[in-house]
Every structure is written in C-alpha cells, then in structure tokens.
Amino acid sequence: MAHVALADKGQDLAHPKTWIGAYVWSQDHKVIGIQYIIVATAVGLVALALSAMMRLQLGFPGIFDLIQPNEYYSAVTMHGMIMVVFMLTAFFLGGFGNLLIPLMCGARDMAFPYMNMLSFWVYLASVLVLCSSFFVPGGATGAGWTLYPPQAITEGSAGSGMGIILMLVSLALFIVAFTMGGLNYVTTAFQARTRGMTLMRMPLSVWGIIMATILGLLAFPALLVAAIMMLLDATLGTSFFMPAISDLGEVSSTSGGTPILFQHLFWFFGHPEVYIVALPMFGIASDLISTHARKNIFGYRMMVWALIAIGGLSFIVWAHHMYVSGMNPYFGFFFATTTLIIAVPTAIKVYNWVLTLWHGNIHLNVPMLFAIGFIFTFIHGGITGLFLGNVAVDVPLSDTYFVIGHFHMVMGVSPFLIVFGGMYHWYPKFTGRMLNDTMGKIHFWVTFLGTYAIYLPMHYIGILGVPRRYFAYGTTLSFPDSVQVINASITIAALIVGTAQLLFIFNIIWSLFNGKKADSNPWRATTLEWQTPDTPPKHGNWGPELPVVYRWAYSYSVPGADEDFIPQNEVPSENSKHEVET
Amino acid sequence: MAQAESNYYIPHGSYWPITGSIAVCSLMVGFSNVLNGDTWGKYLMFFGAIVLLVMLFGWFGAVIKESETGAYNDQVDTSFRWGMFWFIFSEVMFFAAFFGALFYTRVYSLPWLGGEGTGATTNSYLWPGFEAIWPLTANGPGEIGGEFTPMPAWGLPAINTALLLTSGVTLTWAHHALKANHRGQLIIGLFLTVLLGAIFMVLQGVEYYEAYQHLGLTLGSGVYGSTFFMLTGFHGMHVTIGAIILFVILIRCIRGHFKPEHHFGFEAAAWYWHFVDVVWLGLFIFVYWV
C-alpha cells in the first residue's frame, strides 16, 4: 500500500481513537520512528548491562563471580552484535531515518508506509529471537561478535548449538526488516521531496541517512549469505567454511571449504556496516553544529561529496580487518592504501566541522555539547584507526585492547554522542517538551569525560600486549601486574558512565510529563521539520498545503536579515537578499 | 526531479504488518527448532507459513485494489520503480556474494589446501594427500565427501537454459502485446512464460532427484556439493517466487487489469524474471559448465 497522491480526493487523514489504532496499527512514519527508538534503546540497555557484567569480571576477577567463562563469551558476543546492529543501525536508520527523512524532505509520509510498518515489526521479531537465545540450553553464542567459524559452530565452544542458530536467524530477520525499511528511506528521499527541495538543498542528515541506507542495501546481502551458509554448516553438514578438520581426534565430515571465506564475507558487510553507523552520525553532527553555531555549514557540497566518496570507498577496505589471517602481503598493501585514502574525505568532514565552528555564534546548549564532544572522540578514534590500517602496526596490535579502545572511540562512543545530541535536539519536536537541561549537562560531562577514563587506558594496556576476549588474566609474565589496577579503574569509570545513561533514560521519561513546554522551533533552526504547523506534527505532517522550499538548509546569520536564521520555506524577499548558497 | 503533490490519500492503520511479523517470527523460530533437531518446530513453521500467506494475500490484494481504483498517479509509479530497482540491486549483491564464495573456493582456498605456493607444508601436515581438483571428489584425509559424479552440463541443465531463455522471449512478447493492447497475445505470452518456468522447476526437481539417487551428489559432498545445491537451490527458490508472481499477473491480465500506458506491476515482475534469467546464465557457466 503505497503513499498515494490523489489530487481530487482532498485530505483524508487518519485520526485513530484507540491506543491500539494509534500505536500498533499505525503506519505513520513518526510512530514507527519512535517505536524503533524505544526498542533500540531497550535492547541497548541489555547490551549495557552485559558490558557492566563483563567489566565487573575484568576489574575484580573472583570477587563478584557474576558470570562464568562461557557466559562471559556470550556477553562479549551479544554486547557487540546488539550495539552495532540491533542498537546503532536500527536507531540511526530506523529511528532518526523514519522521523527525519519525510519531515526534512517535506513529504507527508514514507513512500511505502505499509512496508515501513512491517519493517519495524519484523525488527522487533529479530530482537526477540536474539534475546531468546540467552535462555536456550547452551546459552547465547560466544563466538565473538564477528562469529568466526569453525569456533562458532564447533561443539564445545559457548553457545555452539541453539545459540548460534538463533543468532543467525535473528540476523536474517533483521536484514529482511532493514531491506524493507531501507527501500523506503531511499525511495522517499529521492522521490517524495517537496517542491524546491533539490538534492543539493537537502539537509546533511538526510544525505547521511540515505547514503548509509544504500550501503546497507548493498552490504547486508553478504552477511545474509554468510549467515545462511554458516547455518547450513552448523546443521546440515555442508562444507562452506570447513576444510577437512580434525576435532578432538575425530575428522570432520567436511572438505574443501575455508573459514577465511567467512571472514571475507563478514567484513565485506562489516566494514560498510561501520559506515552505515558513521554516515548518519556525520550528517546529524553537521546539522547540530551548524544550527547551534548559527553559521552555515562550511563547504556543503564538499560535505555531500565526501559522504558519497566515503560510501563508495567503504566497499574496498574490508580486508584491513584480516591482516593477521595470513593474506598475501601485496593484498595487505592494497587494503592499507585504500584505508589511508578513505581518511581523506573523513578528514575533510572534520575540518569542515571545525571551520563551521570558527567565528560562529556558538550556543553551548546540550545538543551542541554532544556534537562538539563527538568531534573530539571521533578524531581520537579516527587517528588510532590510521595506526591499525597499516599492516606493520596492526599485526602486533591486533586482538589487543588497543583495538577495543580504537573501535569503541570511533564507532561506540562517537555515534552514541550523536544519538544523544540528536535526542536532545529533536525531542521537543516529537513530544512538545524540552529535555531537562541540567540533567542533560550532567549526562554530557559524565559521559564525555568518562569515555576518556575508560578508553584511553585501554589503548595503553593494548600496547602493553593485553589480549582482548579474556575472561581473567591471572598472573602472567607477559605484562606488568599494574594492568589489573588499570582494569579496576576502567571498571569503576564504566559503571559511573553506565549510571549516567540511566539518568538520560530518566530524563526522557520525566520530561515527557514535567519538561518545559517547547514552541514549534525552539532552536530557531532553518530545516523543514521545525516549520510544521503542529508540534508534534500530526498525521500527514503539513496540514492542507505542502511547504515550498526556496533555499538550502543552512541560511544562518544572513547579513541584513531580521533574524539569524531564514527557514527553508520562507518566500524570498528583502529580508533574504544577501544570502549566499555554497 | 520528482515533485510531490499537495493532496494525498494516506493509508490508515493496518493490522497486517503485525500479523506478518508474528508469521515471520513463528516461521523462523520453528525453522531454528527444526534445524536443532527438535520436533515441535515444524508445527510452528507450518502455522507461520499459513499466516504469512494470508498476510501476503491481504497486503497485495489491497495494493491491487488501490491500483485498480486509480489511486496511483505518476509519482507513485516512479516510487515503485525506485523501490523495485533498489530491491533488485540488493538481490544482485545477494547472488554476487554466493558467486564470490564459489570463486573464492575454486580460485583460492582449494589450491591452498592442495599445497600451492607457500601452502606446501600446510598441505603435507594438515591435509596430506589432498589434491586441488574441481569438482572436488573424495580426496584428502578421510576421503571426505564420498564418491560422486558431478552434474554434467549438457543434459538437463542445457535444456533448462533453453527453457529460461525462451521464457524471457515470451515474456517480452507479452509485454509488447500489452503495450499494443493485444490482450489475446498478452495472455498467451504470459501463460507460456509461466508454463516454461513451471517446467524448469520440475526439471530442476528431477535433477536433484538424479543427483541424490544416482550420482551420489548431496549437500554433504564436500564443498562442491555445498556450493552446487546452495547456488542452484537459491536460484530455484527465486524462479519459484518469480513464477508465482507472474502467475498472479497472468490472472490479473485475464481479469482485464493493466493499461497499455500504465502497468508497472507487470513490468516489475518482468524485471524480476529477467534478473533470475541472468543469474541462471551465470550458474550454467560457472556451476555446471567450467
């Protein structure tokens, strides 16, 4: 059931009376976006709890005894997979994508609202299947979030029975859900924009989300294929990832496959997946920075082309995750080169954010704090990425805590800061109330400083050679005993940061009832979602007439204008005669 | 650039999506259970499949109704085109990954196991006696995979290639007939296409039966059997879906749906069918022939 334009039928909008009509049967993109956000947050809290258990074990081995070694591996695996796929991907594309694309493009809804709704419900099913794997015999899979075979499916490793089956089935469901949602996001942004909204006038948030969606549509099939093959290897005795191996003296009944093939397929998905999370993060960060610095984004076209270039390049860097798999050195050289090349458009984006801030009228409110904090964490995570992109540096560092520190900075904390910034920024539009400022500032400073307390020491112990995925280290001559002290301090910092996230959840719920009432455009932003007739926007978004767009999304501080912003849909007049689009 | 119109009919709530979710969830949980060797899973799977079918009937029925009552304008038509384009692109990547796996196995992993280049010691210690041959028959430690005869290309597969290529031609004929408003030719062309697709599926079934019964080629026959059944199996699944779609389109044509200038439902099915056709050519060349 598509999004139908009908000139002769006039307005015919839904006004559901019942709760079930409004929240279960609704095909409204805003309801779906909020549902995505709620489920992603809930499953993210599960992953947060898992990380707290892991940290307690690592920081104080033998004292809390919350989890056994096998459960520790399950926790590592589920924490990683949930955070990357079921939380961040779903939050950025399902959550922000659904909320923002139609509103920012000036559409009444997604192109295919029915498929959009189906996408959410299948996503929920995938989350339920995933979480059910905690409760099956053998527990959730403990193969690490990369699920490398043969370990993932070999008897004796954690969750190699039902656990891995449920994980693969859940991923398959997620991919089905994502594909249905993704077709919507791309089609809506390319096809349902309002009059005057040319591609080069779209806010960067929309650009980031649709580029990420395109990456997802092209990369997720590789994961689906890998999941199907592994499912059959685990259950029906096929040989895709299994050479003839002997396990506990018994030769397996497989022949001719190779586990390296899985690594290639996984990372052919896995590296674009990093950018599926990163591109929406870039886009939203650009909009937050421009709005709260009251200044147009520096180099808009460059930002768009950088997004496209990063998206394209992200498909030819995957094997830099596999330098230690015994690959041909020339192959490694190629992937190291492409990895360094992808740093160029990424650096362009960072410079442009900084130049947007330069001489801006910076309002240090909560979304802006998160956006500026994001620039810091992203640079730190990105720089260590350059280290790991080089074969000679990566080989000694791989599978150490240096890698953990790197990717948590660049695609753990950075996207989360933008998720938070985006929530503080757009919450007033979708609820009609502001989030509490004081709680927001506490949340920011604890999270931002705590991040460094957690991850900077991880880089250090990584260089000392502490390997990742260990349940306990005991006494060893490989690295000094002081590592244990550092681990304990990391755990304490992590628990504090974890608690700050609960404050954020509390803030969201508390402000829903007690927050300051927000007017329709509290940040005085230019983009279309702030110009809706109602706050929160009603079904159909725009009332009787669709807005018409006359300018790009970044007309801030235009000389001679009455206000320091000119909305995208304001008719050109004396007020806007000095504006320039770049 | 597409311009949105000001007046819209926006679909109201629908209970089908959550029904579909329950169906897919039951289907997959049941499937996991079956794979794990338990018994109750197949009932849950059966339940899920039935509910899914009901949901698809409800969904597509509503779309067809919207289309036939003239609710779709050019913008919606273009939206469908974009959606279908990206869907097929995604499907292309799906099969690309399967072919990638096949090429990787044949070009890299088998020669490595066989001791090529720097793999000589790996071969002699870990896989003594393993020889890199394709098709990979019983070989190496433990004579894994058993003796089997690989599927010859110039028997049933060649006939199947001819069938699918012909079905592409008849489908194009039907499309031209639809554009020229020759309903009779349209229905005959489409009927032939569905018939050829059905014969293809039957022959594919015969081929699988032959493989299991007479050639000794099974899913467990080492990596040759795995890739063979995986690639042809997923292609066969796509042919089945494509044939069902075309069958529905055929019924709609018999009922007088579609106009010479406005028939994206037909075209989408045709895109899908041609895509499946092209995949088969790849399969015939790389799985059966060379």
Image: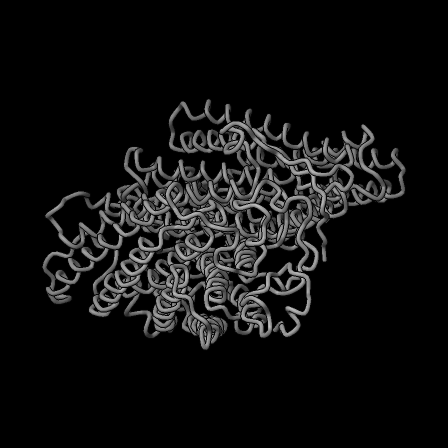
> Which residue is at the far front?
A562
Q: Is residue A242 left or right of residue B78?
A: left
Q: How is the image coloured?
A: one colour
How far across and how far down the image is residue B114, in percent? 42, 59
Q: Nearer the viewer, residue A580 or A200?
A: A580
Q: Position of residue A243 (x, y in %)?
A: 39, 51
Q: Is A304 located above or below residue A67 in the figure?
A: below
Q: x and y percent of residue A216 in the render?
A: 52, 53
Q: Examine the rendering and report whether any part of residue A334 can be seen.
A: no
Q: Quadrant of the N terminus of chain B?
A: bottom right
**Percent position of residue B158, x then y:** 69, 45
Q: Measuring 36% from the left and 65% from the top, which residue is drawn there?
A: A373
Tell me: A463 left or right of A25.
left
Residue A202 seen in the current view:
yes
B160 vs A523, nearest the viewer: A523
Quarter that holds the C terminus of chain B: bottom right
